[in-house]
Image: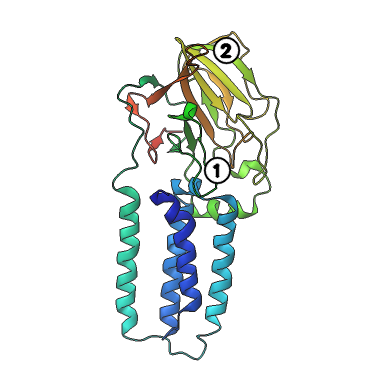
Amino acid sequence: MNKYIFITDILPFIFIWLIWITAYRSKLQWILRCFFLLLFIGLIFLSPLKIFVNQYIGWGIWITFIVSAIRSFLKIKKLPFASKADWWEALFGTLIIGAIIFILNYPPPKQEPASSAQKINLTFPLRSGSYYLTNVGFSPSIGGFPTVHSSLAEKFAIDIMRPRNLKEFFSSFFKADLGQYAIFGDDIHSPCDGFIDKANDDLPDLIPPAKGTGTGNHIYLNCNGTTILLAHLHNKSIRFKEGQGVTTDDVIAQVGNNGNSTEPHLHINAYITRGENNPVETSQIMFDGKIAKRGSIIEYGQ
């Protein structure tokens, strides 16, 4: 089990259990512990780590936190508001949150060794603001839960999402339409000069938590012999037909949500076919000359 799954799927429940069982000395101690736990959970759901959280575990974190907070609040009604020890606890909690932020960002997530892998330099396909690079590379199932990019053919696959502010984060629990996701409908430019090999955009877009299978609506681009897959595209948004040439100036589709997707995002993968005995050789993706790394933020002016 890697450090990200432990932090996202296990550590929150440990902290919630401590909120439940603690015998508090003051109301301020209860406020501090709930605040730091809420901050910790927020760090998970507002960062690229969100993609490691199983859908049902995510709901479980919020439900058990609310239940635990209510139960523990009922125990502190007759306690004094504060004690001297609370200020030391505030300092200690701040240090813990700082340590968690440090652990999440250093050392950077390790990439699959790619010294012998072919690399392809692409133009970043989304140009309407800030974007996260998430799920760079593959990982097998962990703890019985399937992970994204679990096949070797997705060794260097990338999911691209939009950062979300607090308002967008809390509204995500009550989404009634896909337009509330910042990335939904963003124009996708061709990441290279080439031609459309295969394309399909017949599938409807799904509102989370509904989820399909596979690539959903997609385009296969041929870029000088390398195949570029763009997946989970908006229904009926593809602007070019199979066989037509495209350049990096062309808008070829829009971001949607279909196939094996938990929320609107763009999936991109690059590979070369090598025949039946070695059908796929994956290519490591570079955007504008830089290796794509998990957690990177790419910004384009609107």
Can the viewer see residue 126 in this picture? no
Residue under the point 50% across and 85% down: 76
Using the rendered view, name the quadrant where residue 296 is placed: top left
| Residue nearer the viewer, 257 or 247 | 257
Residue under the point 53% across and 53% down: 169
Q: Are marks 1 and 2 in contact (CB under 8 Å)?
A: no
Q: Position of residue 175 (x, y in %)?
A: 65, 50
The nearer-to-camera label among 1 and 2 is: 1
Circle 2: residue type: Asp
Mark 1 or mark 2, which has the lower sequence index? 1
| Residue nearer the viewer, 259 or 276 | 276
Can you say whether 68 is above or below 278 in the image?
A: below
**Disc 2 crowd, CA 10 A, few/some/many (<14, 14-19, 20+):** some
| Residue nearer the viewer, 276 or 36 | 276
Give the Cα distance between marks 1 and 2: 30 Å
Circle 1: residue type: Pro
Can you say whether 195 is above or below 263 in the image?
A: above
Can you say whether 142 is above or below 16 in the image?
A: above
Q: Position of residue 263 (x, y in %)?
A: 58, 42
**Disc 1 crowd, CA 10 A, few/some/many (<14, 14-19, 20+):** few
Residue under the point 30% across and 71% down: 92
Can you say whether 45 is above or below 289 in the image?
A: below
Q: Is residue 143 left or right of residue 208?
A: left
Residue ID for mark 1:
146
Q: Is residue 239 left or right of residue 38?
A: right
Residue ID for mark 2:
197
Residue under the point 39% across and 35% down: 298
Checking the image for residue 68, the label placed there is none
State the SS at label 1.
loop
